[in-house]
Amino acid sequence: MNLYNEEQVRNWSEHTFAYIEASEADHVLTITLDREAKKNALHPQMVNEIAFMMHYAHFVSSVWMIVIQAKGNIFCAGADLKAMAGIIEPNDSTVPQPSSEVLIGELFNKVYKPTIAKVTGDVYAGGFFFLAGCNIVIAHDDVQFGLPEVKRGIYPMQVMAALLKVMPARKVIDWCIRGYNLPVVEALKYGLVSEVHSVDEIDQAVSRIIDELKQNSPSAIRYGLEAYDHIQPSAAEHQYLHEMLMKAIGSKDGQEGLRAFREKRKPVWVGC
């Protein structure tokens, strides 16, 4: 974790966050995606804010685990396509810029604390970094998951790599190239989701898991997760996948897909 240093993150509560909420209680850091009006799409500064708090969790021994949740009926719609096209809205965040670009697919591997995703809304595209990156995923029984990138002239390069850590390769490729929505029951079958619960049960399920984790040694878990990280794809591979994504976005089809999305029309592909 080298995007922020310990001194920068230690006084996190003094900062203004534009796109997330954060709270800490009884060894649990809760990060809430708070961009409901934009379907919690990943604005660049939103990614910085998440990275800032994940670095805090990494550095501070009082944090034993992290819960990630979201406001609204869309947990995360993936990357902000307007921002990807260079249209970045202003914000009042005081969280500083990281020392280098955040590779969100790498971020979850490095915190070395158990991470729990509480999924109460649909997930699309880059939103799967949260599900594939977290150690435990608890989802509502009525949510669905979609990878629509190929319908926008893009391919989910880094998301594919993240999903391959937790799902069978053939299913991941099929999903990526066809771009359909996956029901939560299938996500459970293929290992993307740990448990599925009704709206009335999900809070209790998350609390149960937190209580179970608190019975175990935080240091043993930390060392184990660090050891696991050493057998995962390197940062260089994530960087390569990011470069390939930028290549897809810069293609004629990529630019056409983004225009068609903004103009709410069907894209006209040229194949290059």
Image (cartoon, rainbow, N blue to C red):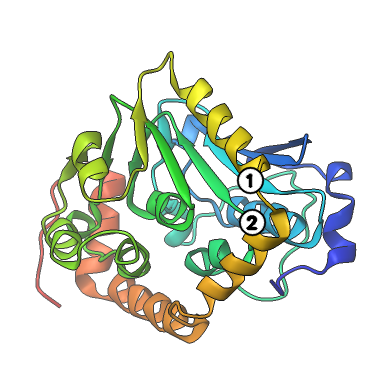
User: How many circles with numbers are drawn on the protein?
Assistant: 2
How would you rate the neighbour count of disc 1 (Cα within 10 Å): few for under 14, some for 14-19, many for 20 or more? many
Q: Under tag 2, what secondary structure?
A: loop
Q: Which of the labelled discs sits on residue 76, or is there none?
A: none
How would you rate the neighbour count of disc 2 (Cα within 10 Å): few for under 14, some for 14-19, many for 20 or more? many
Residue 5 makes an appearance in the image: yes
Q: Label 1 amino acid?
A: Ile
Q: Are marks 2 and 1 in contact (CB under 8 Å)?
A: yes
Percent x, y for residue 20? 64, 40
Residue located beneath label 1 in the image: 66
Percent x, y for residue 204? 52, 21
Percent x, y for residue 70? 52, 34
| Residue located 64% across and 56% down the image | 113
Q: Label 2 amino acid?
A: Lys
Determine whether 98 is above or below 128 in the image.
below
Determine whether 226 is above or below 52 in the image.
below
Determine whether 141 is above or below 119 in the image.
above
The front one of 255 and 112 is 112
Comes first in the chain, label 2 or label 1:
1
Q: Under tag 1, what secondary structure?
A: strand
| Residue located 23% across and 56% down the image | 152
State the quadrant of the N terminus: bottom right
Determine whether 182 is above or below 175 in the image.
above
The front one of 269 and 39 is 39
- Give the CA distance from mark 2 to mark 1: 7 Å
Percent x, y for residue 189? 21, 44
Residue 256, by quadrant, is: bottom left
Q: Which of the labelled discs sits on residue 113, or is there none?
A: 2
| Residue located 40% across and 84% down the image | 240
Residue 33 makes an appearance in the image: no
On screen, residue 216 versus residue 10, left or right, reads left
